[in-house]
Image (cartoon, rainbow, N blue to C red):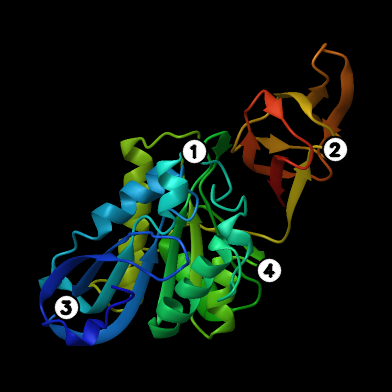
């Protein structure tokens, strides 16, 4: 099955499906469609774009258990949007082509596997949704403090992120990223991040589930109004990357505050000789920090929001 039309499903029912899109390589994508008994918007909830962001994947599987009797409209959940990366426990990239799925949207019908997968998600799913909630987290080697990202200046997406309620909110251009591709189609979208390092603690999973429920209330899919949550907007998101490969010894973790010029880690060669002392380019908060000792050229090291 390449896709499914939720309108053909009976109102007030939930259906678990396995999709088999034609991407040039056999792949099975799990999908749950929760169709409420009352008319309303269609909301797409995704996770597993990066295969080792486990808290987000577990959160999406729990969202898929929504009681249809409580739903107005339709909620479509793709909890493992990138199965090859999930089963390979792959960090950042899809193992079939070495590309980061969340950097190639809206994709290409004739491209590599990740580009074809992005194209399928964009044209089969974003186009039918009234809103996108994309769940993420720190990858296997990253510590992270909860935050969300939306397309800069897109008011409906900003409102959706504020309803989701994570404490930090970044406005970004997001070229190649899923939320940006959805926004370009006129679909409000938020990327919500929590947990990391291959962990899925109950508190962080529930943080994401609760955020989805708040967002669904905001969209009038679930009854109720989300309580106001303190959300701090960040104007910049600076990524620091390794200029050489070697040993990385960070001195900060996700959530730490930093000052401009503060040393945040040391990169050395395999003999321990210091190659570079990495300093913060600005005051801000560490949104994510790579904790891996092994680093290759071009790898991200730290992301700082300000």
Which image quadrant is residue 38 in?
A: bottom left
Q: CA distance from mark 3 to mark 2?
A: 51 Å
**Crowd band around label 4 with a 10 angstrom C-alpha radius: few (<14), some (14–19), many (20+):** some
Q: How many marks?
A: 4
Q: CA distance from mark 2 to mark 4?
A: 22 Å
User: Taking 89 as reference, is 222 left or right?
Assistant: left
* Dot 1 and dot 2 residues touching (CB under 8 Å): no
Would you say residue 168 is visible in this rendering?
Answer: yes
* Dot 3 and dot 2 residues touching (CB under 8 Å): no
The one nearer the camera, 229 or 108, is 108
Q: Quadrant of the N terminus?
A: bottom left
State the SS at label 4: loop
**Residue at image x 58%, y 66%?**
115
State the SS at label 3: loop
Residue that carries the numbered disc 1 in the rendered image: 196
Q: CA distance from mark 1 to mark 2?
A: 24 Å
Could you tell which of marks 2 and 4 lies nearer the N-terminus? 4
Which image quadrant is residue 67 in?
A: bottom left
x and y percentages locating residue 132 in the rendered image: 43, 72
State the SS at label 1: loop
Could you tell which of marks 1 and 2 lies nearer the N-terminus? 1
Q: Which mark is residue 243?
A: 2
Residue most toward the top? 271
**Residue at image x 67%, y 23%?**
293
**Up/down of 164 relative to 128, above or below:** above
Residue that carries the numbered disc 4 in the rendered image: 175
User: Taking 153 as reference, is 89 left or right?
Assistant: left
Could you tell which of marks 1 and 3 lies nearer the N-terminus? 3
Q: Which mark is residue 36?
A: 3
**Crowd band around label 2 with a 10 angstrom C-alpha radius: few (<14), some (14–19), many (20+):** some
* Dot 1 and dot 3 residues touching (CB under 8 Å): no
Q: Which mark is residue 140?
A: none
């Amino acid at each position: 099955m390449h896709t499914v039309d939720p309108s053909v499903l009976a109102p007030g029912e939930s259906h678990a499906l396995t999709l088999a899109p034609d991407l040039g390589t056999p792949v099975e994508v799990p999908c749950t469609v929760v169709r409420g008994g009352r008319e309303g918007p269609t909301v797409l909830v995704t996770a597993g774009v990066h295969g080792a962001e486990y808290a987000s994947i577990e959160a999406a599987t729990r969202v898929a258990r929504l009681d249809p009797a409580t739903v107005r409209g339709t909620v479509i959940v793709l909890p493992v949007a990138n199965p090859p990366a999930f089963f390979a426990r792959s960090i950042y990239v899809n193992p079939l082509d070495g590309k980061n799925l969340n950097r190639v949207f809206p994709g290409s019908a004739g491209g590599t596997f990740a580009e074809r997968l992005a194209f399928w998600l964009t044209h089969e799913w974003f186009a039918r949704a009234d809103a996108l909630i994309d769940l993420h987290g720190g990858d296997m080697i990253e510590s992270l403090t909860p935050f969300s990202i939306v397309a800069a200046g897109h008011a409906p997406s900003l409102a959706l992120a504020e309803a989701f309620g994570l404490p930090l909110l970044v406005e970004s251009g997001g070229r190649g990223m899923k939320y940006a591709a959805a926004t370009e189609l006129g679909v409000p979208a938020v990327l919500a991040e929590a947990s990391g390092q291959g962990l899925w603690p109950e508190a962080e999973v529930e943080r994401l589930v609760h955020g989805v429920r708040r967002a669904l209330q905001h969209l009038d899919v679930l009854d109720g109004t989300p309580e106001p949550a303190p959300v701090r907007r960040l104007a910049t998101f600076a990524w620091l990357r390794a200029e050489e490969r070697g040993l990385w010894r960070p001195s900060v973790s996700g959530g730490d505050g930093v000052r401009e010029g503060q040393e945040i880690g040391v990169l050395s060669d395999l003999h321990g000789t210091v190659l570079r002392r990495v300093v913060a380019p600005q005051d801000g908060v560490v949104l994510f920090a790579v904790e891996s000792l092994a680093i290759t050229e071009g790898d991200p090291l730290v992301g700082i929001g300000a």
